[in-house]
Image (spheres, helix red, strand yellow):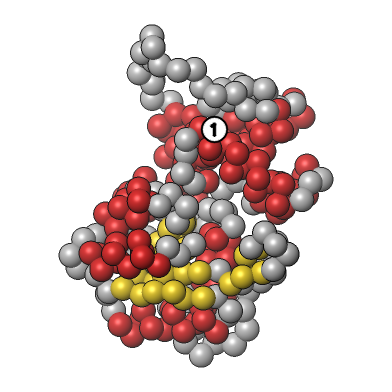
Amino acid sequence: MTGSAGSAGSAGGTGGTVGTADTGGGREAPVTVMVVDDHPMWRDAVARDLTEAGIHVVATAGDGPEAVRRARAARPQVLVLDLNLPGASGVQVCKEVVAHDPAVRVLVLSASGEHADVLEAVKSGATGYLLKSAGREELVDAVRRTAVGDPVFTPGLAGLVLGEYRRLATVPAAAAAPDEPAAPRLTERETEVLRLVAKGLSYKQIAQRLVISHRTVQNHVQNTLGKLQLHNRVELVRYAIERGLDTADDTGGAAGATGTGGGRRGGDM
């Protein structure tokens, strides 16, 4: 990582105490992270940079099977994951870890900026994708933002992901089976938050837009994820885009159901 080891300073978070997560009792606990990379020097440098920034590195691994085993045991909030691993690919590791524990958020840290790699990682459950050319502060900030649920992408890659979701949204969906349950209804506020999430706003920006707290935004998102049986914010963005909520008119009011939206306008993740 450019400027990784030995760099001074750390980046700010997106709400709350920097490098920490609210435990619910008024105390702040460090964000817990696992680092997976097959190059020991790189892996150690990333772990050291995160530790120096006040982030708790609970485990590391150098291959795919080891990563899956240790992630299940350590249960980190964030898994910093390389794609090119021996034994099992990073994509496979991501699928297995997220399937076992949907609460784990995966931040891919890869040398590859190939579009196919980015899309495959996101489809496997990754919350964000950062290139290894990122500096220390950019990585630290990305880990903190990933921990609170923000999708984090190297500039230029976010538009790629949104573009793919919009492309998929134009593909006609298969007709629902007669006995398939109706989509769960969201409250007006949940739909409003969902629309802003789909437009690419961070939790902090949504809180400012709606004049509510950062924690309230997180609660609405978690409630919506539960109702829709989705695992992370990236899946939520895709869900909303498929229903046109990313282009709904901000002034048009929120719809009370999951599938309704107003006029069309572009957004950025």
Q: Residue at x 55, y 75 (%)?
A: 55
User: Can residue 116 be seen at all in this image of the molecule?
Assistant: yes
Residue 243 percent coordinates (x, y): 53, 26
Instruction: Name the spot of residue 195 as percent of width and height, x first.
Output: 63, 35
Left or right: 152 as drawn, with respect to 100: right
137 to 87, vertically: above or below: below
Quadrant in which residue 54 is drawn = bottom right
Q: Quadrant of residue 72?
A: bottom left
Q: In this view of the protein, which residue sits in the foreground, 113 or 16? A: 16
Residue furthest to the top: 178
Residue at (35, 51) in percent of width and height: 100
Name the residue tied to disc 1. 227
Task: Tell me if residue 85 comes above or below residue 163 in the rendering.
Answer: below
Residue at 71% x, 28% y is 188
Instruction: Give SS at disc 1.
Output: helix
Q: Quadrant of the N terminus?
A: bottom left
